[in-house]
C-alpha cells in the first residue's frame, strides 16, 4: 500500500471505466424496478399482494446484509485493493442469478412462489456483493470533492445509459425472443443478453480503475467499533433517510409506468405534423420510460454546475421540491392529454436526475467526516449504507406498489375498475411525490456544507501526511 495520499488527476479513461460499473448494475436495476413486478403478475402468474410481500421480506433481508458486505470489504486486503476484487469475482454469478430470476419454471403455484423467493433473494445478495464495493470505490479513488462529484456524474451517466438500453430495447426483445406470444421465453432470453453485457462491464470497471486513498494509519478496528462510530454520525442518518425517500419516489414511479399505460392511457391516436398515428400502449410506455431515463441523464449532467454555484444541499432540496410538485400535477392529466403527460415526464426526469449523483458524492464526504471525527476510516461500511438505503427505499416502494394494486382491486390482464385505475394513478403521481417531500424533510437538516468539508479535507491531509512519515 502507498504510504501517501497525494493529489491525483482522474483520467477520462478511468472515469469511463468507473461509469461502466453502474451501466451494468443499472441494466438490472431497471429490470427489477420497472419490469419485475409486471413480470411476476402478468407473466409469471403471482398475485400482486403476494409479490409485494415477497419484495418486502427478501429486500429487507438483503438490505440488512449490505453493512456486513461493507465491513468485509473494508477488511479485505489484496494486490487489487479492497473493493475492486468483488467486481471481478462477482461478475459471473451476477449474470447467472439475473437470468434465473427472470426464468419461469414449469411448477404449480406454490412451487413458483418458492422458486421466486429463492432466486430473487440470491440475486439481490449477489447484487450487494458487487454493488456495495463498487459504490465504496468512489471514496478511495480520489480525495478531491469536485472530482468526486464528477465521478458520481460519470457513474450516473453510465447508470442511465444502461437503463436506457434496457428501456429502449426490452419490450421489443421480449417480443422478438418470445415468438408465438411466449412472453416467459422472451423475458428469459432478453435478460440473458443483458446478463452477458453486465458481466463484461463489471470486469471493465475492475480493470480500468485504481484505489488511491488510504487511512493515515491502517488501524485495526472491530466491526463493533465501526458500528459505534457510524451510530454517532449524524450526517449518515440524515443521508440514510433522504436516500430511502428518493428511492421510494423512483420505485413508485418506475413500478407503475407499465400499469399506467396498459390500463389507464391505453392505445392512442396521435396527431403529429398533420398526420394521425395509431400508437399502442406498449410503444407509449417504452417511449415514456426511455424519455424518463434520458432526461435523468440531463439532470445528472446539471448536478455539478448547479451544486458548484449553490451547494449540494440546496441543489438537493431544489430537486426534491420540483419533483414533488410536478408529480402532483401528473395526477390531474387525462389519457387524451398525452402531450402534457410526456412533457411533465421530461421535467420530472431532469429534476429527479439532479439529486442522484449528489447522494453518492455526499456519502464520500460523510466517509471523510467520519475519519476526521474518529480517526478511523470505514469507507465500505459508510457506502454500504447508501446501498442499504437504496434497498429499503426500493423495498418500500415495491411493496407499497404491490399492496396498493391489491388494495385497489387490481386483477391482471382484465379491464380495471375505476377504483383500480385510481390506485395506479396515485402510485405514479401523488404517492410518489410524497416520497420526494420526505427527502426534502431529511435534507433540511444536512450539516456538511462545502465550507466545512474544505476544513475537514485540509486537516485530514495534514494528519495523513504526519501519520505516514
Image (cartoon, rainbow, N blue to C red):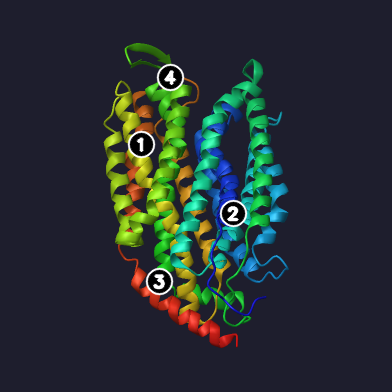
Mark 1–mark 2 Cα distance, whole angstroms, equals 30 Å
The local secondary structure at tag 3 comes to helix
Depth check, mark 1 against mark 4: the one in front is 1
Q: Which residue is mark 4?
A: 415
- Name which quarter of the figure residue 292 lies in: top left
Mark carried by residue 234: 3
State the residue at coordinates (41%, 29%): 260
Side of 298 relative to 464 (left or right) = left
Residue 286's spot in the image, x, y percent?
48, 28
Mark 4–mark 2 Cα distance, whole angstroms, equals 51 Å
Residues marked 1 and 2 touching at CB (< 8 Å): no
Side of 301 relative to 85 (left or right) = left
The outermost residue toward the top is: 275
Residue 110 seen in render: yes
Q: Nearer the viewer, residue 253 or 214?
A: 214
Q: Nearer the viewer, residue 47 or 289?
A: 289
- Mark 4 or 2 closer to N-term? 2
Q: Which residue is mark 1?
A: 346
- Mark 3 or 4 closer to N-term? 3
Side of 158 relative to 325 (left or right) = right
- Mark 3 or 1 closer to N-term? 3
Residue 238's spot in the image, x, y percent?
39, 64
Depth check, mark 1 against mark 2: the one in front is 2
Amino acid at each position: 500500500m502507498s504510504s501517501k495520499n497525494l493529489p491525483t488527476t482522474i483520467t477520462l479513461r478511468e472515469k469511463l471505466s468507473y461509469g461502466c460499473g453502474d451501466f451494468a448494475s443499472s441494466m438490472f436495476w431497471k429490470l427489477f424496478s420497472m419490469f419485475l413486478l409486471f413480470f411476476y403478475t402478468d407473466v409469471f402468474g403471482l398475485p400482486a399482494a403476494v409479490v409485494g410481500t415477497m419484495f418486502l421480506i427478501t429486500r429487507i433481508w438483503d438490505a440488512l446484509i449490505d453493512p456486513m458486505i461493507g465491513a468485509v470489504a473494508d477488511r479485505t486486503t489484496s494486490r487489487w485493493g479492497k473493493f475492486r476484487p468483488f467486481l471481478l469475482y462477482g461478475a459471473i454469478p451476477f449474470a447467472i442469478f439475473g437470468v434465473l430470476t427472470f426464468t419461469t419454471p414449469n411448477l404449480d403455484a406454490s412451487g413458483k412462489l418458492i422458486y421466486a423467493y429463492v432466486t430473487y433473494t440470491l440475486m439481490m445478495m449477489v447484487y450487494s456483493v458487487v454493488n456495495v464495493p463498487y459504490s465504496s470505490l468512489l471514496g478511495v479513488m480520489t480525495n478531491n470533492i469536485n472530482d468526486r462529484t464528477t465521478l458520481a456524474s460519470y457513474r450516473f451517466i453510465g447508470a442511465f445509459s444502461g437503463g436506457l438500453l434496457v428501456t429502449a430495447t426490452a419490450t421489443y426483445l421480449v417480443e422478438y425472443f418470445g415468438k408465438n406470444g411466449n412472453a416467459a421465453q422472451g423475458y428469459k432470453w432478453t435478460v440473458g443478453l443483458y446478463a452477458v453485457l453486465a458481466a463484461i462491464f463489471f470486469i471493465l470497471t475492475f480493470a480500468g480503475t485504481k484505489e488511491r486513498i488510504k487511512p493515515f494509519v491502517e488501524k485495526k478496528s472491530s466491526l463493533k467499533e465501526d458500528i459505534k462510530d457510524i451510530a454517532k454520525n449524524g450526517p449518515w442518518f440524515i443521508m440514510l433517510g433522504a436516500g430511502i425517500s428518493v428511492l421510494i419516489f423512483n420505485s413508485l414511479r418506475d413500478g407503475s409506468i407499465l400499469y399506467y399505460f396498459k390500463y389507464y392511457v391505453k392505445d392512442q391516436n396521435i396527431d403529429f405534423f398533420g398526420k394521425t398515428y395509431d400508437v399502442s400502449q406498449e410503444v407509449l410506455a417504452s417511449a415514456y420510460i426511455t424519455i424518463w431515463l434520458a432526461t435523468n441523464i440531463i439532470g445528472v449532467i446539471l448536478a455539478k454546475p448547479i451544486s458548484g454555484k449553490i451547494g449540494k444541499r440546496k441543489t438537493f432540496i431544489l430537486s426534491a421540491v420540483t419533483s414533488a410538485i410536478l408529480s402532483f400535477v401528473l395526477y390531474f392529466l387525462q389519457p387524451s392529454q398525452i402531450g402534457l403527460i410526456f412533457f411533465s415526464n421530461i421535467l420530472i426526469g431532469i429534476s429527479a436526475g439532479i439529486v442522484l449523483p449528489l447522494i453518492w458524492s455526499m456519502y464520500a464526504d460523510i466517509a471523510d467526516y467520519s475519519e476526521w471525527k474518529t480517526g478511523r476510516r470505514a469507507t465500505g461500511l459508510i457506502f454500504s449504507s447508501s446501498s442499504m438505503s437504496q434497498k429499503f427505499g426500493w423495498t418500500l416502494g415495491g411493496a407499497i406498489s404491490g399492496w396498493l394494486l391489491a388494495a385497489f382491486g387490481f386483477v391482471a390482464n382484465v379491464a380495471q375498475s375505476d377504483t383500480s385505475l385510481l390506485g395506479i394513478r396515485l402510485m405514479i403521481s401523488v404517492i410518489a411525490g410524497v416520497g420526494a417531500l420526505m427527502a426534502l424533510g431529511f435534507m433540511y437538516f444536512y450539516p456538511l456544507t462545502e465550507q466545512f468539508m474544505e476544513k475537514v479535507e485540509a486537516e485530514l491531509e495534514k494528519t495523513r501526511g504526519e501519520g505516514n512519515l
